[in-house]
């Protein structure tokens, strides 16, 4: 968020808006979007009842409306350049590594602490093999930075130093996959709460004519205080006037939509399919066809009807959500906005505080 980053550093002892002093690190509340501390007078509630700061409230007010105008390629590229300021100094001059929290083909993720403020962040460290990979990382940073939503992971800074790229991002506690590793299914109200939070993120992305293209439990992050964030826009794409459909086969096989699997052109509705598969994953413990060879997975996605292993474990309302999402005809799938208007989501009974209590109980199981 440009307004908060002009000086590059943040003071945890005072409100970032009015500069009211806190009692060391204990005062103030964090904004649900930017995650920085403010006093109670400088926080308000968004339409979903979440506390947000005055800076973020202005950004939301300026982006009202069901759908933003689709940009042309030139204006979008200009926006990317303006929001992707790469720092070329050594990030280890500013951050101390605490511990490694994840690793994979993408690189490594560390918990780091800002040497000046003591604030904790996650640092994704990637070593791109070529200029194409570097551009993909920059694209991920820019698209994430432009999202600005309380249910999408926040990216703060990007560094390029000694052939490595560091992305300094919001620190979360675990992925949804970790929650699903338990032997028993979560209570349905908890499942619906999580799905609604993810759906808020998808709706925000689609309003800007973007496609995530890799929605799955690995890419849903959770904090022990009850926050839920969609992350990893590495496969994300911006639709523009010159190219309103995509055809690239990307994503994780068991979660991708039939139109991707068959090589057809597609739009945002592929994310709705993946969202339906995510719901199945939360109920059955894994998506359909997961244990098959990738080629067979794609064939089954195109030809075989998607079914729950345990349909009797859930309500008819939740079953209908999955049905709406996994229609093989993308034109028949409901949009994220339409899904959010269904009673199953408008009548959610779990609050963030109750979900935080659920997470507290889960953390004790983890030990």
Image: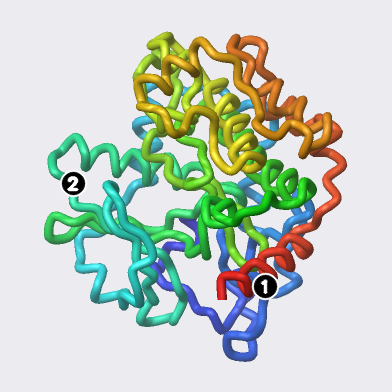
In x, y percent, where is residue 47? 78, 47
Q: Are marks 2 and 1 in contact (CB under 8 Å)?
A: no
In x, y percent, where is residue 118? 44, 81
Instruction: Locate residue 353 relative to residue 298 in the image: left or right.
Output: right
Task: State whether residue 58 is above or below residue 304.
Answer: below
In x, y percent, where is residue 181? 55, 54
Number of marks in the image?
A: 2
Instruction: Locate residue 43 relative to residue 210 in the image: left or right.
Output: right
Say which residue appears at 65% left-offset and 81% top-offset.
20
Q: Secondary structure at mark 1?
A: strand
Quadrant into which the C terminus falls:
bottom right
The mark closer to the camera, 2 or 1, is 2
**Residue 280, quarter of the rendered image:** top right
Give 357 or 43, whichever is nearer the viewer.
357
In x, y percent, where is residue 77? 35, 31
Give 274 or 248, whichever is nearer the viewer.
274
What crowding class fits label 1: few (fewer than 14 Cα within 10 Å), some (14-19), or many (20 or more)? some
**Badge number at residue 29:** 1
Q: Secondary structure at mark 2?
A: loop
Which colour scheme appears in the figure?
A: rainbow
Residue under label 2, please give it: 128
Say which residue appears at 79% left-offset and 38% top-offset.
345
* Outermost residue to the bottom: 23
Give 160 or 310, whichever is nearer the viewer.
310
Answer yes or no: is residue 211 visible: no
Say which residue appears at 46% left-offset and 33% top-offset.
290
Answer yes or no: is residue 248 visible: yes
């Amino acid at each position: 968020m440009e307004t908060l980053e002009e000086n590059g550093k943040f003071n945890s002892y005072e409100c970032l808006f009015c500069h009211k002093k806190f009692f060391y690190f204990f005062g103030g509340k964090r904004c649900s979007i930017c995650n920085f501390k403010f006093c109670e007078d400088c926080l308000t509630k968004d339409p979903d009842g979440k506390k947000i700061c005055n800076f973020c409230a202005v950004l939301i007010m300026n982006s009202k409306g069901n759908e933003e105008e689709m940009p042309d390629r030139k204006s979008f590229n200009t926006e990317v350049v303006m929001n992707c300021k790469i720092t070329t100094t050594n990030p280890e001059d500013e951050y101390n590594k605490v511990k490694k929290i994840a690793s994979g083909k993408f690189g490594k993720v560390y918990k780091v602490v800002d040497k000046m403020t003591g604030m904790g962040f996650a640092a994704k460290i990637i070593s791109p093999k070529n200029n194409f990979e570097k551009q993909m990382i920059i694209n991920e940073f820019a698209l994430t930075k432009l999202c600005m939503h309380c249910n999408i992971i926040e990216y703060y800074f990007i560094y390029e130093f000694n052939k490595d790229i560091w992305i300094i991002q919001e620190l979360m506690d675990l992925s949804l996959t970790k929650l699903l590793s338990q032997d028993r299914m979560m209570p349905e109200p908890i499942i619906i709460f999580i799905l609604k939070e993810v759906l808020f993120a998808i709706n925000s992305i689609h309003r800007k004519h973007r496609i995530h293209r890799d929605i799955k439990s690995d890419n849903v992050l959770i904090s022990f205080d009850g926050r839920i964030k969609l992350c990893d826009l590495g496969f994300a794409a911006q639709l523009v006037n010159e190219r309103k459909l995509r055809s690239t086969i990307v994503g994780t096989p068991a979660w991708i939509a039939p139109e991707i699997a068959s090589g057809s052109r597609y739009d945002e509705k592929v994310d709705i399919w993946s969202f339906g598969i995510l719901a199945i994953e939360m109920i059955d413990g894994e998506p359909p066809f997961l244990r098959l060879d990738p080629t067979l997975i794609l064939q089954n996605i195109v030809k075989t009807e998607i079914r729950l292993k345990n349909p009797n474990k859930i309500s008819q309302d939740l079953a209908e959500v999955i049905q709406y999402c996994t229609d093989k005809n993308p034109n028949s799938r409901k949009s994220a906005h339409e899904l959010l208007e269904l009673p199953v989501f408008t009548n959610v009974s779990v609050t963030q505080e109750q979900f935080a209590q659920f997470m507290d109980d889960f953390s004790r199981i983890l030990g």
